Amino acid sequence: MSVDESAPDLSHIDAWIFDLDNTLYPASCDLFALIDERMGAFIQKLVGCDAVQAHAIQKRYFRDHGTTLSGLMALHGTDPHEFLDYVHDIELDRLAYDARLVDAIARLPGRKLVFTNGDVNYAGRVLDRIGLGDSFEAIHDIHAMDYVPKPAPASYAAMCARWDIDPARALFAEDMARNLKPAKDIGMTTLWVNNGSDQAAGQACASFIDYETSHLTDWLHELTREMA
């Protein structure tokens, strides 16, 4: 893969859009392990199966429907609020305040938004924990997407329409490479945060990735230094 790793000229960007999980905090925090456990328990109760079967169902729905929730809604009529409240009822003590990231995002010129397949309540808790609770204009979540998650192209277009974003003047940063393709297709600049997330592994494609970094904070600091 050949991806531009030079200091970028992004002076045209006036909207900075970030995925949440494994993007704005390190993948090593592994919050998904806690969420996965809650998802498995939810599926076991719903379907009446054991933990191994529940795990297989969860991963199949994620693969085939974009999120486990989408599969549960389509095939079981699951109430999204009930599911999300349950699976996000986790402790966040694995996360820490990240002063360098707070500073880097504050120095970005223009608007800043979060675009997540999670929900706004969970996202708000995570952002508060890492110090970014007041850093973003908006959180565009799975409810705002009408439960059609990334990487469905319609969700990207709807997000841009909702917040009056010109894709040609926007950058989207995300740890899951597959979620960058629809952003690139509508004209966004893309940044793959290749930080070791299992969900990102092996999905890179230079045709829709403009920039790649293993460490978002360092990349943003270098970028804002170039802008100064």
Image (spheres, rainbow, N blue to C red):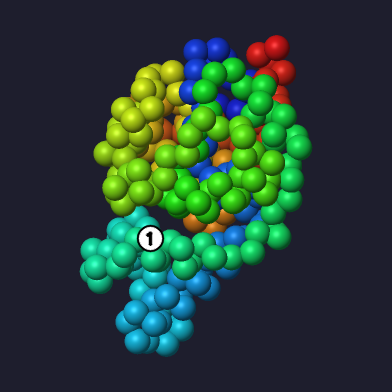
**Residue at 45% over, 51% down:** 119
Residue position marked by numbered label 1 in the rendering: 81
Q: Is residue 9 above or below residue 89?
A: above
Give percent across and percent down for residue 29: 66, 57
Judging depth in this view, the residue of 152 and 209 nearest the camera is 152
Q: Is residue 17 left or right of residue 6?
A: left
Q: Residue at x 32, y 82 (%)?
A: 47
Quarter of image, res 77: bottom left
Residue at x 55%, y 12% (from the top left corner): 11
SS state under label 1: helix
Dot 1 surroundings within 10 Å: few (below 14), some, or many (20 or more)?
few
Name the image quarter holding residue 179.
top left
- Residue 175 appears left or right of 160: right
Q: Which residue is at the front of the view, 66 or 99?
A: 99
Q: Does residue 118 lie above or below 177 as drawn?
A: below
30 w.r.t. 173: above or below: below
Q: Residue 13: give x, y in percent of width and height.
A: 50, 18
What number of labels is visible? Answer: 1
Q: Which amino acid type is shown beneath numbered disc 1?
A: His
In the rendered image, residue 123, in percent from the top left (x then y), is placed at 53, 48
- Residue drawn at x 31%, y 65% is 79
Q: Is residue 196 visible?
A: no
Q: Quadrant of the C terminus?
A: top right
116 up-or-down from 183: above or below:
below
Residue 17 in sight in this render = yes
The image position of residue 67, as x and y in percent, is 37, 58
